Image: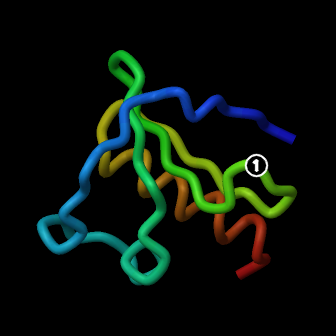
Amino acid sequence: MKHTSLDKEKVQVDFTSMNLPATVLNFRPEVYTDGDMFYCVIGAGTEQAIYGEGNTVEAALLNWEKAYHERSGK
């Protein structure tokens, strides 16, 4: 299981300003930044947590969506 510290700066995301997949728009994972990387998470600190990361907010959200589909089998 991947562990990511959430001792990072939370990013306010305008989900309507990007062309994002429905899964991201429905769940709206929290986004954090640390240096030049962005991290997304839902369910932090639980066995069901889903994480994503990328060098932009959009890349992190798309990586999160990929992890969501891998986890859910959809």
Most distant residue in the top direction: 35
* Residue corresponding to mark 1: 45
On the rendered image, what quadrant is the N terminus found in? top right
Hey, what amino acid is under mark 1? Answer: Gly
Looking at the image, is 67 positioned above or below residue 72?
A: above
Asked if residue 41 lies left or right of residue 18, the reply is: right
Q: Which residue is drawn at 51% across and 39% down?
A: 53
Q: Which residue is drawn at 47% across and 62% down?
A: 29
| Colouring style | rainbow
Residue 2, position in %: x, y? 79, 37
Residue 9, position in %: x, y? 37, 31
Q: Is mark 1 on a helix, strand or loop?
A: loop
Q: Residue at x 41, y 48 (%)?
A: 31
Residue 54, position in %: x, y? 43, 36
Q: Residue at x 44, y 57 (%)?
A: 62
7 and 74: which one is in front? 7
73 and 33: which one is in front? 33
Classify mark 1: residues with Cα within 10 Å, few (<14), some (14-19) or many (20+). Answer: few
Looking at the image, is 65 positioned above or below residue 31?
A: below
Asked if residue 19 lies left or right of residue 4, the reply is: left
Total marks shown come to 1
Asked if residue 32 lies left or right of residue 14, the reply is: right
Residue 67, position in %: x, y? 65, 58
On the rendered image, what quadrant is the C terminus found in? bottom right
**Residue 22 sits in which quadrant?**
bottom left
Most distant residue in the left direction: 17
